[in-house]
Image (spheres, grey):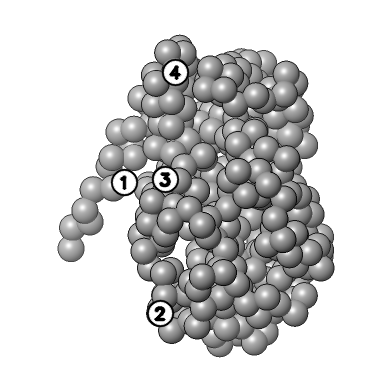
Amino acid sequence: MRIAIFGSGGVGGYFGARLAQAGEDVTFIARGEHLQALRNSGLEVDSIDGDFVVHPVKATADPSQVSPVDLVIVAVKTWQVPDAARAMKPMLATASSVLPLENGVDASSQLAAELGSAPVLGGLCKIVSFIVGPGHIRHTGFEPSVVFGELDNRRSERVERIQRAFATAGVNATIAADIQVALWTKFLFISSFSGVGAITGESAGKIRTHPETRALLQRAMTEVYAVAQARGIRLPADSVEKALASVDGLPDEATSSMQRDIAAGRASELESQNGAVVRRAREAGVEVPTHESIYNALRPLELKAREPRRA
């Protein structure tokens, strides 16, 4: 397959590297020092599943220089999705597919608003990975996996083809029986873990072992479950228990990308995680005091991070 990775950080870089290593025709959309390192030295991946290097690497900052591809994997930050959708149009042909792997539950609708619904799939991933330097990705937690599907849940030839490509690359890939249930299952986990991590400044090991922070995390997860139910998303009854078990399975030092961004004073995914819980709860008439407190505590930091930088 001809594949473009739009957003070549921890998520896009890892999955793109695995696909390229397996022989797929992969082009990375990147910029700055990261782009130069990809072009000059390839992509280095440190992984708990074994380190590897992909070299040479096809990479560019200009999507208009990429001829139409079969698949675009979108792995930018959530607030960058609309701009990414506009920029990727030159890479799309009639039969192209667009697979978002963002956190939250907004990416598919944002992409469809710009591109139309035909090319857009629903998708998510499970991995702890991040950039440690230009051209260098580190995978530290979870068995890397992707879950995706048509927005109407039909099992199409294109999703089966994408699944085969991931499987050949050694990535656990699942076609969702219900993509909205899959997205909200991840949303329940990531919005709660990100928010509690960001306000406490603690990693997974401390959050899950301190009774107070574990209880806070569980309350946050229970609130997302209630919002999902009120919106007609039929999450399994044991969703909170499974999400807590996922936190228990993380390395002690694991943190979320949102937590790391907030700690570093960078713009984060607060609006698409805890902010999105609060907005959807209000629409559904559900009380979410834990997420409201997290959101209200962190929003001043988010606004400060988004202020124009002075020369």
Q: Is residue 55 visible?
A: yes
| Residue furthest to the left | 311
Lateral position of residue 302 relative to residue 140, left or right: left
Q: Position of residue 27 (x, y in %)?
A: 57, 78
Q: Earlier in the sequence, mark 3 or mark 2?
A: 2
At mark 4, the secondary structure is helix
What is the spatial separation of the Cα atoms under label 4 and label 2, in whole angstroms? 41 Å
Amino acid bearing label 3: Ser
Q: Is residue 9 above or below residue 271?
A: below
Residue depicted at 54% across the width and 85% down the height: 39
Residue under label 1: 305
Residue under label 2: 64
Q: Earlier in the sequence, mark 1 or mark 2?
A: 2
Q: Is residue 202 visible?
A: no
At mark 3, the secondary structure is loop
Amino acid bearing label 2: Ser
Residue under label 3: 268
Residue under label 4: 284
